[in-house]
Image (spheres, rainbow, N blue to C red):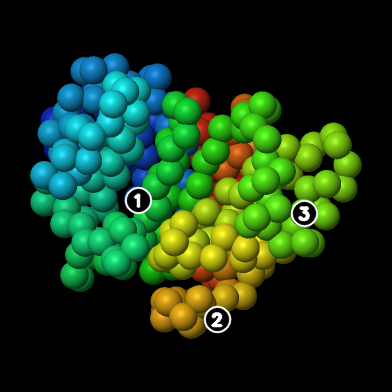
Amino acid sequence: MARLNILAKQHPQIFGMNSGCHVKLTRNQTEVFLVENSNFGQEQIEPLRRFLDPVETARSQRFRFRGDHDSFVIVHGLLRLILSYQLGISPREVKLDYNKYGKPLLSGKQNKIRFSLSHSCGISALAFSLGYKIGVDVEYMNSDFKYGEVSEQFFTSEENSFINAGTEGASDRFYRLWTRKEALLKAIGTGLSGKLDVDVLQDIRTIEPDFESKSISGPDRYILSSTLFENDYMVSLASGDGLAGIRLHLPSGLTTKLT
């Protein structure tokens, strides 16, 4: 609690928002935070920018558009701020490694905390757990997007049958499966370099340890959960089997269960 009070005094412009900094992680519980980037002005973004390490700073500077740059700074700055509270260190002291697919991980003995990040069209998602691999994905559901080619190329025949079961809700069903695929591949550790045709129709998915010969270790079973946010975004989470519950923290400050 002392560490939280210090951070709150140092960064009152961030702690006054629903940033997830006040939530202490517990075993068997996943915390997922949705952040509305438009709620962050430059007075909040600037201290978050100072938390980034040189690698993250260089990545942020590659974005051509200010909105994309700010989204990156917000989600990665908040990641460091939340992890710093959990670990009892300063945000700049948080050390990250990356696996060969580019997935960020906490270094050394800190790595019991697992996390995943995603952002899409003004909404960022951050997910955290203790000891269980997780992956989160959020996507803006563009009603004009022609998803047929994507689903035919990367989805199984059963998944395509599910999407095309009727015209009403077909777009929602596509985004439900697409975000589940991304979330699962993030949890496994391969990201989009993995097999996009992995079947995600069922809420429980068993993955062999040598999935796509990547030799990724971890739980054999993942639980897949999805929900709509403001009817415009699909949010999906893949979590290691054994987690007791998933709490979804909304930008409004409300908390709900993700099932």
Compare residues 180 and 155 and report the one nearer the observer. 155
Residue at x 31%, y 35% (from the top left corner): 72
Identify residue type, mark 2: Glu
Alpha carbon of mark 3 to alpha carbon of mark 2: how far? 23 Å
Residue 24, numbered label: 1
In the image, residue 155 lies at what x, y percent? 68, 57
Residue 160, numbered label: 3
Residue at x 77%, y 54% (from the top left corner): 160
Residue 179 visible somewhere in the drawing: yes
Q: Nearer the viewer, mark 2 or mark 1?
A: 2
N-terminal label among 1 and 3:
1
Identify residue type, mark 1: Lys
Residue at x 29%, y 21% (from the top left corner): 66
N-terminal label among 3 and 2:
3
Asked which quadrant contains residue 171, the reply is top right
Q: Quick one: SS at disc 3? A: helix
Compare residues 51 and 214 and report the one nearer the observer. 214
Identify residue type, mark 3: Asn
Q: How many marks?
A: 3
In the image, residue 39 lies at what x, y percent? 38, 20
Alpha carbon of mark 2 to alpha carbon of mark 1: how far? 32 Å
- Per the image, the residue denoted by label 2 is 208
The answer to whether residue 25 is left or right of residue 207 is: left
Q: Quick one: SS at disc 2? A: loop
Q: Quick one: SS at disc 1? A: loop
In the image, residue 176 lies at what x, y percent? 66, 46
Alpha carbon of mark 1 to alpha carbon of mark 3: how far? 40 Å
Q: Is residue 71 above or below residue 248?
A: above
The answer to whether residue 153 is left or right of residue 58 is: right
Q: Residues within 10 Å of mark 2 (few under 14, many from 20)?
A: some
